[in-house]
Image (spheres, rainbow, N blue to C red):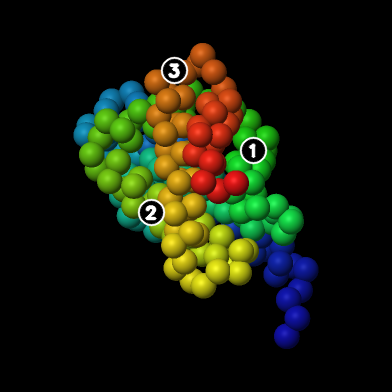
């Protein structure tokens, strides 16, 4: 049976409402963690600040760390989408760099709240652990995309090394940028690191 326009509209509205709820919970978690410190913030407080119930929070996030890192996760998902759409004539490393530049062009230079999140992740073990888990998952996805793009077998060493180098460069760029912020744009810091890391992939 074909989907009607009304059903499509309803489904799209439902997804937008879900995304708005996720975003509200993420922003509430960020605000409360920055104001009070993560240890003092409860899931109940985040839900209250976002105007939803504790049960609703659990429908979207497993814990306050996941709510806090939601924006970071969404940026990485968008980067994967950008990489998947790059022209086949580019080398994979060039396509990865272009995907990151496209992400910055779409979303703009990160704001101070993003910098606060990065510092919080580095300072709090539970957030850092969850963030590293996210990065590991995205690294595997990138390695799979590189292998497919370059015609390599799944799990090929080159694709795994390149994915690891790319993720490591992003993490280091974020660290240096938050340490120096706001003296230089993140894109400038990342480009400098990409040049250093790129030598084996040219």
Q: Is residue 94 visible?
A: yes
Q: Which mark is residue 46?
A: none
Q: Compared to 183, does 152 lie above or below? A: below
Q: Position of residue 198 (x, y in %)?
A: 54, 41
- Residue at the (63%, 31%) spot, across then down: 108
Q: Residue furthest bottom?
A: 1
Q: Which mark is residue 136?
A: 2
Q: Earlier in the sequence, mark 2 or mark 3?
A: 2
Q: Residues within 10 Å of mark 2 (few under 14, many from 20)?
A: some
What residue is disc 1 on?
A: 101
Q: Position of residue 105 (x, y in %)?
A: 68, 35
- Please state the total of marks drawn on the protein image: 3
Q: Nearer the viewer, residue 34 or 199?
A: 199
Q: Is residue 175 left or right of residue 23?
A: left
As helix, strand or loop, the secondary structure at mark 2 comes to helix
Q: Position of residue 169 (x, y in %)?
A: 46, 39
Circles 2 and 3 in contact, beta carbons < 8 Å: no
Q: Residue furthest top?
A: 183
Q: Quadrant of the N terminus?
A: bottom right
The Cα–Cα distance between marks 2 and 1, rounded to whole angstroms, is 21 Å
Q: Compared to 62, does 11 lie above or below? A: below
Q: In which image quadrant can residue 81 be found? A: bottom right
Q: Is residue 59 left or right of residue 142?
A: left
The Cα–Cα distance between marks 2 and 3, rounded to whole angstroms, is 26 Å
Q: Earlier in the sequence, mark 3 or mark 1?
A: 1
- Residue at the (51%, 46%) spot, across then down: 200
What residue is disc 3 on?
A: 180
The Cα–Cα distance between marks 3 and 1, rounded to whole angstroms, is 20 Å
Circles 3 and 1 in contact, beta carbons < 8 Å: no
As helix, strand or loop, the secondary structure at mark 1 comes to helix
Q: Residues within 10 Å of mark 3 (few under 14, many from 20)?
A: few
Q: Compared to 7, does 81 lie above or below? A: above
């Amino acid at each position: 049976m074909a989907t009607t326009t009304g059903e499509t509209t309803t489904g799209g509205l439902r997804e937008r409402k879900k995304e708005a709820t996720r975003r509200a919970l993420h922003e509430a978690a960020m605000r409360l963690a920055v104001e009070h410190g993560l240890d003092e913030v409860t899931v109940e407080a985040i839900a209250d600040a976002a105007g939803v119930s504790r049960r609703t929070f659990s429908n979207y996030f497993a814990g306050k760390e996941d709510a806090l890192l939601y924006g970071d996760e969404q940026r990485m998902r968008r980067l994967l989408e950008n990489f998947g759409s790059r022209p086949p004539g580019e080398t994979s490393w060039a396509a990865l760099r272009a995907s990151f530049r496209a992400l910055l062009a779409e979303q703009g230079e990160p704001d101070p709240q993003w910098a606060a999140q990065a510092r919080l992740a580095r300072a709090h073990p539970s957030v850092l652990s969850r963030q590293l888990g996210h990065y590991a998952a995205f690294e595997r996805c990138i390695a799979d995309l590189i292998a497919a793009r370059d015609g390599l077998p799944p799990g090929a060493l080159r694709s795994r090394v390149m994915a690891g180098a790319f993720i490591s460069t992003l993490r280091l760029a974020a660290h240096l940028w938050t340490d120096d912020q706001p003296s230089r744009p993140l894109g400038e810091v990342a480009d400098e690191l990409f040049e250093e890391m790129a030598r084996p992939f040219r």
